[in-house]
């Protein structure tokens, strides 16, 4: 039982950044823009989450900084792919390379070292006090004890994304722009505006995903720490058929697979 609880807890933690990025991919894809740059936006979010927390000593301000960094990075994709009609795959790949390079440069510039930043003193790696009572539940207490705030936020984000896309007029506009942009333009929907908003939301969620990796795991930034999770999130979004719930379930599946791999190596299999 203890092994199963540990496996489930690990799967939830590993799936959390995938859920955020996959939801970001859903927003972007639903509006008609493929966000290949999720990986790069995650890298930017992971770095700036630590950088802002390092200077402010306030981790939630660091999370906000990560989302802003991801959103600003997404504007590059939005401008080139929407206004200039550039190839979305090429632009996304370029942003990924840019993010890896600029964070390595800033790491050297700010911390005067390469590879890894200093750890912050207030990482978000433990279960929030508000949910502390859950640790007293028989059998499942250890599961909740190992959760981070990002795990709870991920499931809230799934519900909000579903509500926005399928239950609001704005969500209807998103789907109209993505499926029939000319028809949407004919009835007066600003296609450029909707796509810009969705790409920026996508970038902010990817930045939040990066914060979940850096602030929610080791409390520092390390070069290459995203380890291709942006591409896995993209696959989870496609596997989930561009639906928020499907993207979440796919992310949980990928997280579970990675958790099994880690647990197997720990047990010597």
Image: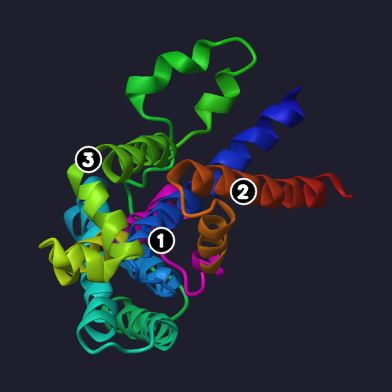
Rendering coords of residue 170 (x, y %):
19, 48
- The reply to whether callout 2 and callout 3 are in contact (CB within 8 Å) is no
Which is more N-terminal, label 1 or label 3?
Answer: 1
Discs 1/2, front: 1
Rendering coords of residue 30 (x, y %):
36, 59
Q: Which residues are magenta?
A: 204-230
Rendering coords of residue 127 (x, y %):
43, 31
The span from disc 3 to disc 1 (Cα, nearest Å) is 19 Å
- Residue at image position (62%, 42%) is 11
Please tell me whether mark 1 sits on a helix, a strand or a loop.
helix
Rendering coords of residue 79 (x, y %):
21, 81
* 195 part of magenta stretch: no
**Residue at mark 2:** 255
Please, what is the dominant secondary structure of the magenta stretch? helix
**Residue at mark 1:** 25
262 in relation to 189, above or below: above
Q: Which mark is residue 168?
A: 3
The span from disc 2 to disc 3 (Cα, nearest Å) is 30 Å
Q: Quadrant of residue 201?
A: bottom left
- Residue at image position (73%, 25%) is 2
Please tell me whether mark 2 sits on a helix, a strand or a loop.
helix
Outermost residue toward the right in this view = 269
């Amino acid at each position: 039982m203890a092994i199963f609880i540990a496996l489930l807890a690990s799967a939830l933690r590993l799936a959390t950044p995938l859920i955020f990025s996959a939801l970001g991919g859903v927003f972007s894809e639903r509006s008609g823009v493929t966000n290949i740059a999720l990986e790069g936006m995650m890298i930017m979010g992971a770095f700036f989450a630590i950088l802002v927390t390092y200077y402010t000593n306030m981790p939630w301000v660091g999370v906000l900084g990560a989302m802003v960094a991801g959103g600003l990075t997404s504007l590059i994709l939005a401008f080139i792919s929407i206004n200039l009609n550039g190839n979305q795959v090429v632009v996304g790949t370029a942003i990924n390379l840019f993010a890896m390079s600029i964070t390595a440069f800033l790491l050297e510039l700010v911390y005067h070292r390469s590879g890894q930043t200093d750890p912050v003193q207030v990482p978000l790696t433990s279960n929030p006090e508000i949910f502390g009572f859950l640790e007293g539940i028989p059998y499942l207490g250890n599961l909740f004890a190992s959760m981070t705030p990002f795990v709870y936020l991920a499931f809230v984000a799934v519900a909000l994304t579903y509500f926005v896309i399928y239950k609001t007029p704005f969500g209807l506009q998103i789907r109209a722009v993505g499926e029939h942009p000319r028809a949407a333009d004919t009835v007066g929907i600003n296609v450029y505006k909707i796509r810009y908003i969705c790409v920026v939301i996508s970038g902010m969620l990817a930045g939040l995903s990066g914060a979940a990796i850096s602030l929610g795991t080791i409390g520092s930034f390390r070069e290459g720490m995203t380890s291709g999770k942006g591409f896995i999130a993209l696959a989870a979004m496609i596997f989930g058929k561009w639906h928020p719930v499907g993207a979440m379930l796919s992310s949980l599946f990928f997280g579970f697979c990675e958790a099994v791999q880690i647990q197997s190596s720990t047990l010597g299999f």
